[in-house]
Structures are given as structure tokens and as C-alpha cells.
Image (tube, rainbow, N blue to C red):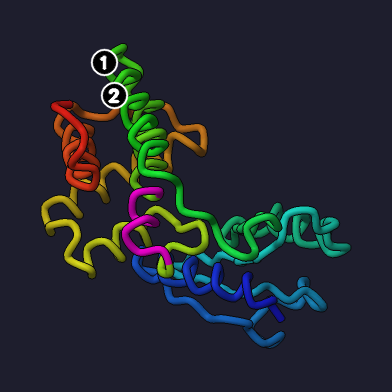
Amino acid sequence: MPRQSERELLTIVRNELVADGYEVILEPSAKLLPLELAGYFPDAIAIKDGEKILVEMKTSGEPRALDHKKVSKFLEHNPEWGRKVFILNSLESDGIKPQEDRQIVDEIFRAIELYNKSHGMPALLVAWACLEASARRLMPEEFRLAQTPGRIIELLAMDGTITPTEADTLRELKDLRNKYVHGDFSDGVADRQIRQLFSILRRFHPEMKDI
């Protein structure tokens, strides 16, 4: 059974997966799992188009589960199954403290500097961190814990903080970001996309000058 902080993270992850078209079953019973995984209890299963994902919540510093080798062996022989482990930093169990506005603005300018030096994807990573930090200042309770990229977009769009067009651009950037952080460097960020993100950040921080 997940602890309270892990429950909150699980809710965030579930919403992200549902937004990506998965059917999510929380705390699945043993009968929903293959016999090879008897005694293993994931926090959720996500299913879409024949793909099945085992979802686990972990707190950083926890020892590796005894069933790790069993699950790894099962996945090796069953390619239709996957596994996602989400780590909740134990230092963040009481939430992430909102950053000072000046700190965020400094990082935004760092992202702009990276982009001006033709480091597009590193600029996107820094700018995305600024997006979450800015959103946390706007909605501290909703962003008390670290958020998945899709959930950030969903919350900002539902609140009316960003327009539907901006939300669409952020979804494009989310996909680019996710590919990059997982080692796929085949795509770059378009000027239109990154400038839209900078524009959103500037609106969050009106003290900024032209970017």
C-alpha cells in the first residue's frame, strides 16, 4: 500500500497515463497479473493497444525489492510488457518549496542564453524546469509535489493560465523533452516552439524585459 506522499505521486502518474490514452488499474489484484509474477504487487497497470506497463512508486533510498530479478526476467521474455518506476525523493515528501521569483528569472535567462548559443534541447530542459517552478508559485498546493510534464500542461490549461494553442505547443515540447531525457537525440526544438515557451514564461514574470 503506498504511503500518502506516494499516493499523491501515483495520482499524478495515473492522470498522465490516462491523458496519453492508457487504461490504468490501480493496485491490481493478483489475478490480473501473469502467474510468473506471483507475489509481486505493482502499484498500477497501464494498458493501451496491447502494451502493458507495470507501474511502481518508490521512495529514494529504499532498498531494491527482492522480486527485482524475477520481474526483470519476466520482462525479458515478454516484450509486450514494460515497467515504469517513479521515484519520490524522500527530501520532497513534505512537498517542494516554491522558488523565489528572482531565482526562476535567472534560470529563464540561462535558458535563453543556451538557445542563443544554439543549444536548443538543453535550453528546453532548463526552460521546462522554469515552467514547473513558475507554476508552483502560481498554484503552490497543486504543484506541491514534482509533476509529470503532461500534468503540468493539464493543470495550467484547466486553470486558464495558458491558451489552448499554447497547450498544444507545450505538448509538442513535452514529447521532445521526454525523448531527449530518455536518450533519443534525433529531433531538435523548433524556433517557433521554444519562443512560445519563452513567451509563456515572460507572461508569468512581467518584470522581465524583451527576450
Q: Nearer the viewer, residue 49 or 206?
A: 206
Q: At 84% across and 64% down in the image, what residue appears?
A: 67
Inspect this view and state whether residue 85 appears.
no
SS class, disc 1? helix
Residue 80 shows which numbered tag?
Answer: none
Q: Nearer the viewer, residue 14 or 6?
A: 6
Would you place residue 205 above or below residue 147 in this image? above
For disc 1, the marked residue is 116
SS class, disc 2? helix
Magenta residues (range): 133-140
Residue 138 placement (x, y as % from top left): 31, 59
Would you place residue 86 above or below residue 204 in this image? below
Is residue 88 located in the magenta-colored stretch of the structure?
A: no
Q: Amino acid at mark 2?
A: Ile
Residue 128 placement (x, y as % from top left): 36, 41
Q: Residues within 10 Å of mark 2 (few under 14, many from 20)?
A: many
Specify whether 102 is left or right of 181: left
Residue 112 shows which numbered tag?
Answer: 2
The answer to which quarter of the image holds residue 125 is: top left
